[in-house]
Image (cartoon, rainbow, N blue to C red):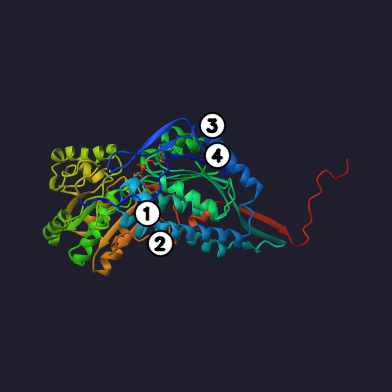
Amino acid sequence: MLARAKPEYAIPEVCRNFVNGQWVNSSVRLPVINPVDEQVLTEIAEADAGLVDDAVGSARRTFEKGTWSKLGLEERQKVLFRIADLIDEHADELAWLESMNIGSPLSQCRGRHVPRAAYNFRFFAEYISQSRSDAYTQLDNYLSVVTREPVGVAALIGPWNAPIALTSMKIAAALAFGNCCVVKPSEISPLTALRMVDLIRESGVPDGVVNLVNGSGAVTGAALASHPDIDVLSFTGGTATGRAIMSAAGQNLTPVTLELGGKSANIIFDDADFERALDGALISIFSNNGQQCLAGSRILVQEGIAERFIDAFVQRTRNLRIGDPLLPETEVGPLATKQHLDRVHSFVDTLEADGCKLLIGGNPCAGFEKGFYYEPTAVLAPDNKAVVCQEEIFGPFAAFQIFKTPQQAWDIANDSKFGLLGYVWTSNYATAMAAHEHVKSGVLCINSPIIRELRAPFGGYKESGVGRESGAACEAFYSELKTTAFLTGDVPLRKLGAGEA
Ligand code: NAD
């Protein structure tokens, strides 16, 4: 392995909490581990329930003061554009921090995740200038006008797998519609959210609008999710956590959006553009080291091309460049944590009983003295009942199945507790239309890996989530609708109590 590039950017010794414009420490420290050398990269100062309460209180008071919630649209836009510009100006640093923290290849962090974070702020800055609302005039003598108001305080809880891209989406949407927020990044990946908060402050967002609490899910996350003074909660993470969060928030009738897990089917028909489908299948399962909710982790191939396709896939998998995520040539880096590596590896134990054939991989990588590297893995499953076809593995682990007819493909695709994405590769228009009709997933990509169109809803069917994220979906979530009825004519009123005794 080549020597790794020297660190060029500072990593804070302690990731503190940001409450009402101040950095706040705490005595409970949790280590954050570098997935490449397994050393402590930094620590987080865990926010307990009291500090979470301070952060929510700060957001609430700031919201009521109106320094942000009542700021004129153009001023708000200017600040959001400034955040986007600052993210772009610090893109190398942010990508480096992300890659150091979670082990994602630097090229992917720099090429996709950080530009996406900047774009999220630009998108919502532009979106709010085009917002419209309704007026109803059908009722004689009344004009009913519908307006939107910011909802108040948003709790934003993020995962570790793509922190900057996903957390920036939540912050950008909450701020654009005039809210204050409390952000809780994953305890595994605090670095980019922390730096983003610095940049948000530099952009001119008033103190108290964006607060950040660090800590574990059990302590900090649970305190935030159950806090009675949050108005909405947006969560991205695992399905089990989503359940706990929805129950906690439900006690306060706090509305939630949940972006959860997936086990998406990537369906490749005989008539697909072979090379393009092959590229797409590899991208869908091995990008971000396989740690993506939207991974095409069940690859269904039609029998006419199955053998050739699977052979080519295995060959390309063998050639993947695994290594230090900071090196430009690296295509697959280490998994984020040792615990996650062990979990991914544990699925190999299920293969024999389920009759699956291991095609490649299936072990932690040899040849690395340190680091949570896992071999890119592919298996062939006899049917969709196999554990590796049902459970989200969230690693570089593809499960192939072979199908005969389109109907079989739809049945296999839909036989899942998840329903986040679907991918279909075909040159037949009718097959594409049939996929559109039959595949039960929140997003379906035809002849393409994931394309995230922010104007269009993103989210999952079934256990993949509740609610959607998009311009309009976020507008609905982060604002309250108010109907005001104006009397415009002469409407006599009944005179209660004015009768003769
Ligand atoms: P996770 O559920 O373990 O943690 C996510 C966040 O929730 C973390 O900040 C964690 O501290 C917090 N948390 C944990 N327990 C909590 C509790 N009881 N109350 C409040 N907060 C709590 O998820 P993860 O391992 O960080 O991320 C991986 C999962 O996220 C995968 O299942 C993946 O599919 C999913 N994901 C979904 C999307 C999507 O858009 N659908 C995107 C990315 C990741």
Q: Amino acid at mark 1?
A: Ala
What secondary structure is marked by label 3?
A: helix
Pointer 1 local density, CA inside 10 Å: few below 14, some 14–19, many at least 20 = many
Q: Secondary structure at mark 1?
A: helix
Q: Looking at the picture, how far across and down is residue 413, in whole percent? A: 26, 52
Q: Is residue 358 left or right of residue 299?
A: left
Of mark 4 and mark 3, the one earlier in the sequence is 3
**Side (left or right) of 196 relative to 300:** right
Question: Which residue was labeled with disc 4?
Answer: 55
In this view of the protein, which residue sits in the foreground, 478 or 342? 342
User: Rounded to the nearest whole Å, what is the CA distance between mark 1 and mark 2?
Assistant: 22 Å
Q: Nearer the viewer, mark 1 or mark 3?
A: 1
The CA distance from mark 2 to mark 4 is: 32 Å
- Viewer-nearest of discs 1 and 2: 1
Tell me which numbered mark, 2 or 4, is placed earlier along the sequence. 4
Determine the CA span between mark 1 and mark 4.
Answer: 27 Å
Query: In the image, is residue 272 above or below residue 391?
Result: below
What amino acid type is highlighted by mark number 2? Glu
Asked whether disc 2 touches disc 3, contact meaning CB atoms under 8 Å apart, the reply is no
Q: Position of residue 201 (x, y in %)?
A: 54, 51
- Per the image, label 4 sits on a secondary structure element best described as helix
Q: Residue at x 26, y 61 (%)?
A: 424
